[in-house]
Amino acid sequence: MISFLGKTVQNFIQTMKYIVTGRMRFEHVISQAVEISYDSLPIALIISIIAAAVITIQVSKQFLMSGADSYVGGTLTVVIIREIAPAFVALSIGARAGTAISAEIANMQVTEQVDAIKTLKVDPVGYYFAPRIVAAGFTVPMVTLIAEVAGILGGMVVAYLTIGLHPNRYITSCWLWLNTRDFYISIFKAFCFGIIIANVCATQGYETKGGAKDVGVSTTQAAIKSTIYLLIADFIINFLFYL
């Protein structure tokens, strides 16, 4: 893991140099943005809404028994914005798009397409990594914003159906508890998570050697490693901003 971390950092630095020199093509970023975030939007929204519904069911009756039912909306808003939306969106995108990135680059590696790029004097790390990292870094926060809204609205519906909490009281509680700082941290989290997903999964695919069987193994490792690094990054960001 330490050796792999060193490779991801090295590839990220090399990718940044590639981007700064202006060799990255904008159309490649757009196509990767569609594959990474737009195609992952439905599953990310489903997971966020279900998570919000489960949390609402867990806390609404307890709050009602203690006479604090008007705090359900605010509590759910804080939980979704701080943790649920950015973390669950990143995990869902990593499981779907991250593994696809790893499999695609791994297949190029074992079929010697990467070597062909090198013969054309093109930096393969920059060429393959840059569009994916930029696309993930800018679009994962967008998906997170949509997931936050969907989760909060889903919680409102569940709160009304379970304890009869009026939507006006729910929305008022959401506005009272909503903190601009939490919103900014949530966007920053999603930005970091997007970069981690693209960089880790692309690195795993780039380091693949062998044949078709190794491509499958690399895809599995990409899902595992991206999840581990996402959770570590989540802990570090929470430690820095909320401790």
Image (spheres, grey):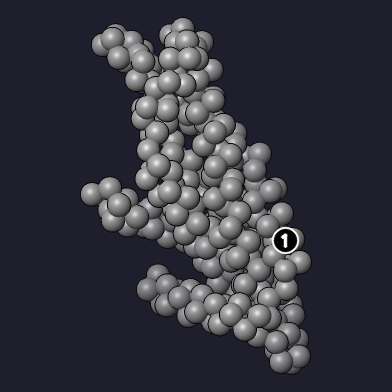
Amino acid tagged 1:
Ile
Q: Is residue 177 above or below residue 118?
A: above
Q: Is residue 53 above or below residue 89?
A: above
Q: Position of residue 101 (x, y in %)?
A: 64, 63
Query: Quick one: label 1, few (<14), some, or many (20+) residues within 10 Å?
Result: some
Foreground residue among 121 and 169: 169
Q: Secondary structure at mark 1?
A: helix
Q: Position of residue 2 (x, y in %)?
A: 37, 73
Most extreme residue toward the left is: 243
Q: Quadrant of residue 237?
A: bottom left
Q: Position of residue 23 (x, y in %)?
A: 68, 81
Q: Is residue 88 left or right of residue 25?
A: left
Q: Residue at x 70, y 55 (%)?
A: 35
The mark total stands at 1
Q: Is residue 162 shown to the viewer in this render? A: no
Residue topped by disc 1: 30
Q: Residue at x 44, y 53 (%)?
A: 189
Q: Is residue 187 above or below residue 104?
A: above
On-image quarter of the N terminus = bottom left
Q: Residue at x 66, y 68 (%)?
A: 131
Q: Is residue 98 left or right of residue 232?
A: right
Q: Residue at x 58, y 66 (%)?
A: 133
Q: Position of residue 217 (x, y in %)?
A: 58, 64
Q: Is residue 31 left or right of residue 103?
A: right
Q: Is residue 119 above or below residue 174?
A: below
Foreground residue among 74 and 36: 74
